[in-house]
Amino acid sequence: MTTHEPWCQVWIERKGLPCDCGYDQYLGAKMPSSEEMQQFADKLVNDITWMTGAVNASSDILSELQRAVEKHGFDKTPMNPDMDRRDAFIILSEEVGEVARALTYDGVNRHKLEEELIQVAAMSVAMLIGIRGKANVQSD
């Protein structure tokens, strides 16, 4: 029994259509048109672009978490499982306020807005880490 080439398995899984490795031609299956192949290629490029953006954003968030710990110390960040959750929320809210400020005064500065959104994401993640850390400490 003939098997598909490794690359054509992607085509089969994503489109549910046969590939052009020859195996499906042997079975008499309909091959994708050039237009279908181009659409598939465009979709792959879009997916790769999106994934690259997600990886870059994640890296920015982790860098911001590290910067916050270096600047304020672990105990004064929402990652600290012993920090009162209301205090952690105040820190997060302050960052959200800076996003609002970036959107309302003197037009939108994309760079400043991105910085503030990264800080909101970082403090949200920090708060989640602190909550989960507290749960782990309490369950021990």
Image (cartoon, grey):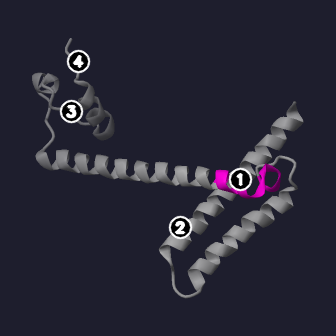
Image point (25%, 46%), residue name:
40
Residue indicated by mark 1: 70
Q: Nearer the viewer, residue 20 or 107?
A: 107
First-in-chain label (4 vs 2): 4
Between circles 1 and 4, the one closer to the viewer is: 1
Report x, y in % for residue 101.
Answer: 63, 80
Q: Position of residue 72 (x, y in %)?
A: 76, 58
Q: Please give the name of the residue rendered at 60% of the width and 50% of the height, measured from the top-left corner.
A: 62
Amino acid carrying label 4: it is Thr
Decide whether residue 75 is among the magenta residues: yes
**Secondary structure of the residue carrying numbered label 4:** loop
- Report the Cα–Cα distance between label 2 and label 1: 21 Å
User: Where does label 4 land, which residue?
Assistant: 3
| Residue 79 on image: x %, y % | 76, 49
Which amino acid, by three-letter code, is at mark 2? Glu
Which image quarter: residue 31? top left
Q: CA distance from mark 4 to mark 3?
A: 12 Å
Which secondary structure is most common in the magenta stretch?
Answer: helix
Percent x, y for residue 137?
86, 36
**What residue appears at the point 21 percent right and 32 percent down from the top-left corner?**
18
Q: CA distance from mark 4 to mark 2?
A: 47 Å
Amino acid on which disc 3 is placed: Pro
Q: Earlier in the sequence, mark 4 or mark 3?
A: 4
Task: Tell me the quarter of the image containing the N terminus.
Answer: top left
Extreme-bottom residue of the structure: 106
What residue is disc 2 on?
114
Using the image, tell me which numbered label, if any, was put on residue 18.
Answer: 3
Residue numbers of the magenta segment: 65-78
Mark 1, secondary structure of its residue: helix
Q: Say whether disc 2 or disc 1 marks the residue closer to the N-terminus.
A: 1
